[in-house]
């Protein structure tokens, strides 16, 4: 058996409210600000954290933030850090092209030699990392594993990434696919510790199963970076331009999301839920906490509408999200949710937790079933 026995998080700086966020990501034009207000009404994020200062400088990287989150996790752990044999990390865009994020975090932590894995996708890369660590511990390959996610999206939202490029419209606004994410994504990191036995004090989460499926056979990329679409809608990688300047001029280094395509993925995500219900992994009536990551309140409302219509709605009072206070932190989000749940004083032994992480990159849906256990469960471990 595999258990989450400790968790931690790191959020840079003080919470940034909606009035001040423009100072951190930079102000482009009144038209861009107008779009920002519309997006904020849709996502209903009240505060978030940025690793980027208003003057455009930073003291952070993803590796450093995730290193802090892992240290916080280890501070709560009963085992010595040297007992950890596996490290899995997740992010949307690494600090460097090479090497992988896990190598950088390992170097940041200074732990002895260990096995590692760097997962890079979008939000569901967190669940890719979690499942890899879960299987490593379950197989007996390692006694303990660290898993984490980190993001530093704000560095891509500064005016310099847009000004002078082909993305700026005549009125100074950005196309909706480029402007939406500026007001949706934020920065931070979080981590969990997996062990082959529960903690000897307090509550742990027993991981019962993890399911992750890609539906890229049905969808074109929805959230992209490092490319632009040509006249036929095909993606041209940045490296296929005449050079770095030409790629930057075209807007290839900007984060983009096709919001219409995002909503077309909802029935597929719900269909994956229904598949797991049919297979007996999910019993909606027995879920005590639905720990779900979503990018906007408007998306949540559509999820509820479709789930209610399909007759598989988990009562909304059981949903757990910290989007309003911590924002959308991509691959870190589900770990932030789990850390808040574990430390919030609301979990009770015997309760069930269902984690859900949809990814719009090219349509991925991940779920995980967990059970809250106490120290007595150590007798049944292994």
Image (cartoon, rainbow, N blue to C red):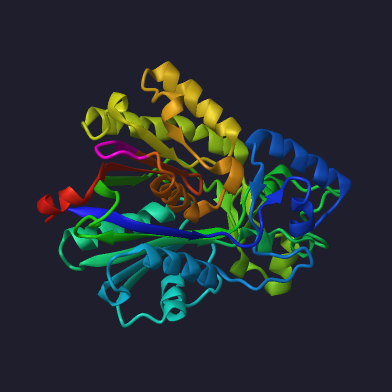
Part of the protein shown in magenta: 347-353
Q: Position of residue 323 (x, y in %)?
A: 56, 42
Q: Specify the principal SS of the magenta part.
A: loop
**15 or 242: nearer the viewer:** 15
Image quarter where the C terminus lies is bottom left
Q: Is residue 171 visible?
A: no
Q: Is residue 221 magenta?
A: no
> Does 355 sit left or right of 204 as displayed?
right
Q: Is residue 100 above or below residue 347?
A: below
Could you tell me which residue is drawn at 82 percent across and 61 percent down? 163
Q: Is residue 45 above or below residue 149?
A: above
For residue 77, what is the image quadrant? bottom left
Q: Position of residue 235 (x, y in %)?
A: 59, 54
Q: Position of residue 203 (x, y in %)?
A: 29, 49
> Does 107 sit left or right of 209 as displayed?
right
Query: Farthest residue toward the front?
Result: 201
């Amino acid at each position: 058996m595999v258990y989450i026995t400790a968790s931690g998080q790191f959020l840079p700086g003080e919470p940034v409210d909606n009035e001040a966020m423009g100072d951190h990501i930079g102000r482009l034009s009144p038209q861009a600000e107008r779009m920002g207000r519309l997006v904020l009404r849709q996502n209903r994020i009240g505060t978030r954290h940025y690793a980027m200062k208003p003057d455009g400088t930073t003291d952070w990287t993803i590796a450093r933030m995730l290193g802090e989150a892992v240290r916080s996790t280890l501070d709560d752990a009963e085992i010595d850090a040297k007992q950890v044999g596996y490290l899995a990390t997740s992010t949307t865009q690494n600090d460097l092209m090479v090497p992988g994020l896990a190598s950088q975090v390992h170097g940041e932590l200074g732990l002895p030699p260990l096995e590692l894995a760097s997962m890079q996708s979008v939000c569901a890369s967190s669940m890719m990392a979690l499942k890899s660590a879960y299987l490593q511990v379950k197989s007996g390959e390692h006694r303990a594993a660290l898993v984490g996610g980190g993001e530093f999206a704000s560095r891509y939202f500064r005016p310099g990434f847009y000004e002078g490029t082909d993305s700026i419209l005549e009125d100074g606004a950005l196309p909706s696919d480029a402007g939406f994410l500026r007001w949706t994504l934020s920065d931070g990191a979080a981590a969990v510790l997996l062990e082959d036995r529960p903690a000897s004090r307090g509550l742990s989460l027993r991981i019962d199963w993890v399911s992750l499926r890609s539906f890229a056979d049905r969808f074109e990329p929805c959230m992209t970076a490092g490319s632009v679409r040509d006249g036929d809608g095909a993606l041209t990688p940045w490296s296929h331009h005449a050079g770095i300047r030409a790629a930057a001029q075209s807007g290839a280094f900007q984060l983009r999301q096709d919001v219409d395509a995002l909503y077309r993925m909802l029935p597929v995500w719900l269909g994956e839920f229904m598949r797991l219900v049919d297979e007996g992994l999910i019993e909606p009536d027995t879920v005590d906490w639905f720990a779900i990551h979503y990018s906007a309140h408007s998306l949540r409302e559509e999820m509820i509408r479709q789930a209610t219509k399909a007759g598989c709605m988990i009562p909304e009072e059981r949903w757990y999200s910290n989007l309003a206070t911590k924002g959308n932190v991509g691959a870190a989000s589900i770990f932030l949710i789990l850390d808040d749940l574990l430390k919030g004083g609301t979990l009770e032994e015997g309760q069930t937790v269902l984690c859900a992480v949809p990814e719009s990159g090219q349509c991925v849906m991940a779920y995980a079933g967990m059970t809250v256990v106490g120290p007595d469960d150590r007798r049944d471990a292994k």
